[in-house]
Image (cartoon, rainbow, N blue to C red):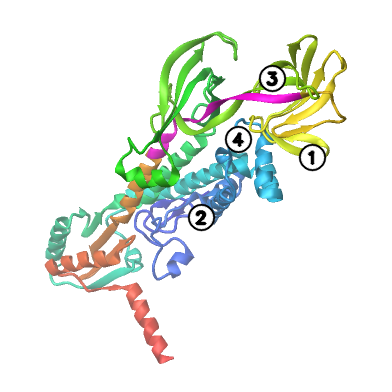
């Protein structure tokens, strides 16, 4: 597009409102206004200049403040939806089976919980649409910042000391009047402004005093901090940057560590210690008498292993790394990972021992033990008798639609369907056996009777790794620097120059805190003979008040 040539001879980019050199208004709207908009120094912004191509339309869309606010509202709304029910991280399930999560939400929250899960709201902060919104917000911040900061920087860098009278008159603070000794007044004004820590430039009978220009970049430093912060949030979705997993591991069990490929953990033993009246501090006496016991410590003694290089995943070819007691707030750390003691379970069923007995005589044909985590299909009890395990329900939850169901794979309430094979019944007799419950299709001659059970403890661990923490911290620090930069300093400018005759004109502008700017002007007026100035905003307010009284 063609450039705009000012009367002073300077060629301005298309869309410029105020001439970059002399400050003359270049648009009809600016010429008709009493005060010019100085937010971007009247410079040409790309979003207000180019509107034809697809790139222009995308740029203009994301540079809009309304669009930016709308995206923020959308992010907040989606985040709010994620707080209605507990997120995936807080759901107490042992594995990562989707059916377990669905069962949890449906069981606790009914139909609403089921719909909440099916819509993906149970893991909303890792969802694709939340990440898209975060990406759109970052794009909006970047484009809106570039659309404004680049022309602002160019305008402030190119600003001239002497400005056209039309520019001076359209400032909020303006004054003009005759001065007896203009040269002496200019000299004293320059001296006083320097004492007030202004950067002073003089040119052809004109003074430009400027102070704290860096404060204008405060909002854009804020935006930079937000962009860094959002980048850290998005990086959390890339494997290896962020891990926040949970695992339950029983005593004697060795499992792969979720989120840490190639590493395995063995739970050697879980220990829980409690305060007693003999070894507790006096502060715990009342609580011990009331509750009976207070946990003083619980820890998991573990061994860490790593798969050897070149071994197949899941193979037993591993090397021992170290042994460590994981205590609350004292995690096991390795290769950027930290494993914390989060929870525990005591008395979890491990094995159950049964006896195959004649119901009438009570005679036992033999005993057998069922490993509740890895049950066998058949148990030989001797003398031609055996017990087949036809079905196993680790966490029996009753009968639904005529079939027994299990609500989880954890052996909290085991139930079995046994087929009892004896010399008298070579085809076997079927029996459903649960804790305190035995069901038979028809009367049997033999029964499976519970004898004993072994228990063990389980540790609930949290695995964390966060490479984005320092990125988030950097974003927060940069953001706060921008807040301080834009809040505690103000960009102030004072123009003083000789008029065409013996008159002298002055004008002043600041992006905020006009009271402090006027105090600086008053100090300059005390040292130099300058004309009286008026604040157009105060003048307009007074005129409105007089008009109101007249009406």
Q: Residue at x 44, y 58 (%)?
A: 17
Q: Is residue 58 left or right of residue 299?
A: right
Residue ranking furthest to the bottom = 550
Can you give x and y, in whole percent of width and height, for residue 359 in the image? 79, 24
Q: Is residue 449 magenta?
A: yes
Can you give x and y, in whole percent of width and height, for residue 380 in the image? 74, 12
Q: Which residue is mark 3?
A: 375
Stretch of the chain drawn in magenta:
448-473
Dot 4, crowdedness within 10 Å: few (<14), some or many (≥20)? some
Disc nearer the start of the sequence (1/2): 2
**In this rendering, the label closer to the viewer, 3 or 2:** 3
Q: Which residue is mark 2?
A: 65
Answer whether residue 214 is visible to the viewer in this image.
yes
The answer to whether 279 is drawn above or below residue 531 in the figure is above
Q: Nearer the viewer, residue 314 or 394?
A: 394
Dot 3, crowdedness within 10 Å: few (<14), some or many (≥20)? few
Q: Residue at x 22, y 58 (%)?
A: 207
Q: Are marks 2 and 4 in contact (CB under 8 Å)?
A: no
Q: Which residue is mark 4?
A: 93
Quarter of the picture holding the C terminus: bottom left
Q: Which mark is residue 400?
A: 1
**Rendering quarter of residue 106:** top right
Disc nearer the start of the sequence (2/4): 2
Dot 1, crowdedness within 10 Å: few (<14), some or many (≥20)? few
Q: Is residue 222 magenta?
A: no
Q: Which mark is residue 200?
A: none
Disc nearer the start of the sequence (1/4): 4
The answer to whether 173 is drawn above or below residue 297 in the figure is below
**Rendering quarter of residue 130:** top right
Disc nearer the start of the sequence (3/2): 2
């Amino acid at each position: 597009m063609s450039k705009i040539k000012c009367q002073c001879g300077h060629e301005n980019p298309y869309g410029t409102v105020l001439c970059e050199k002399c400050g003359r208004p270049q648009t009809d709207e600016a010429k008709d206004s009493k005060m010019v908009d100085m937010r971007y120094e009247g410079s040409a912004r790309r979003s207000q200049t180019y509107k034809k191509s697809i790139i222009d339309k995308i740029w203009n869309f994301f540079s809009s403040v309304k669009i930016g606010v709308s995206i923020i509202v959308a992010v907040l709304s989606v985040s709010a939806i994620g707080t209605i029910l507990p997120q995936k991280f807080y759901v107490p399930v042992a594995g990562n089976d989707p059916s377990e999560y669905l069962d949890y939400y449906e069981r606790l929250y009914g139909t609403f919980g089921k719909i909440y899960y099916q819509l993906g709201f149970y893991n909303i902060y890792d969802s694709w649409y939340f990440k898209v919104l975060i990406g759109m917000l970052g794009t909006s911040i970047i484009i809106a910042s570039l659309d404004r900061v680049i022309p602002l920087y160019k305008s402030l860098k190119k600003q001239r000391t002497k400005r056209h009278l039309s520019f001076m008159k359209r400032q909020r603070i303006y004054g003009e009047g005759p001065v007896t000794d203009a040269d002496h007044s200019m000299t004293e004004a320059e001296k006083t402004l320097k004492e007030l820590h202004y950067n002073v430039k003089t040119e052809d009978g004109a003074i430009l005093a400027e102070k704290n220009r860096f404060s204008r970049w405060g909002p854009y430093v804020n935006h930079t901090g937000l962009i860094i912060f959002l980048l850290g949030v998005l990086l959390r979705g890339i494997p290896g940057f962020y891990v926040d997993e949970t695992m339950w591991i029983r005593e004697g069990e060795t499992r792969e560590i979720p989120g840490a490929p190639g590493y395995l953990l063995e739970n050697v033993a879980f220990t829980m210690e409690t305060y007693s009246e003999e070894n507790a501090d006096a502060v715990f006496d009342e609580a011990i008498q009331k509750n009976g016991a207070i946990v003083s410590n619980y820890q998991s003694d573990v061994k860490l292993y790593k798969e050897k290089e070149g071994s197949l995943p899941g193979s037993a070819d591993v090397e021992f790394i170290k042994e460590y007691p994981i205590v609350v707030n004292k995690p096991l750390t390795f290769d950027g990972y930290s494993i914390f003691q989060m929870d525990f379970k005591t008395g979890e069923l491990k094995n159950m021992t049964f006896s195959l007995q004649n119901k009438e005589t009570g005679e036992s044909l033999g005993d057998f033990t069922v490993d509740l985590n890895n049950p066998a299909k058949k148990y030989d009890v001797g003398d031609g008798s055996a017990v087949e395990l036809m079905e196993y329900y680790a966490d029996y939850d009753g009968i639904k639609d005529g079939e027994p169901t299990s609500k989880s794979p954890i052996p909290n309430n085991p139930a079995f369907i046994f087929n009892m094979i004896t010399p008298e019944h070579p085809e076997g007799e079927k029996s459903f056996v649960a804790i305190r419950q035995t069901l038979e299709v028809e009367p049997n001659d033999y029964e499976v009777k519970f004898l004993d059970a072994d228990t063990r403890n389980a540790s609930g661990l949290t695995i964390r790794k966060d490479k984005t923490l320092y990125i988030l911290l950097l974003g927060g620090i940069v953001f706060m620097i921008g807040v301080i930069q834009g809040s505690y300093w103000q960009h102030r400018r004072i123009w003083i120059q000789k008029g065409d005759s013996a008159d002298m004109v002055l004008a002043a502008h600041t992006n905020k805190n006009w009271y402090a700017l006027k105090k600086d002007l008053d100090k300059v007026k005390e040292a130099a003979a300058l004309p009286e100035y008026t604040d157009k905003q105060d003048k307009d307010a007074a005129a409105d008040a007089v008009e109101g009284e007249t009406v």
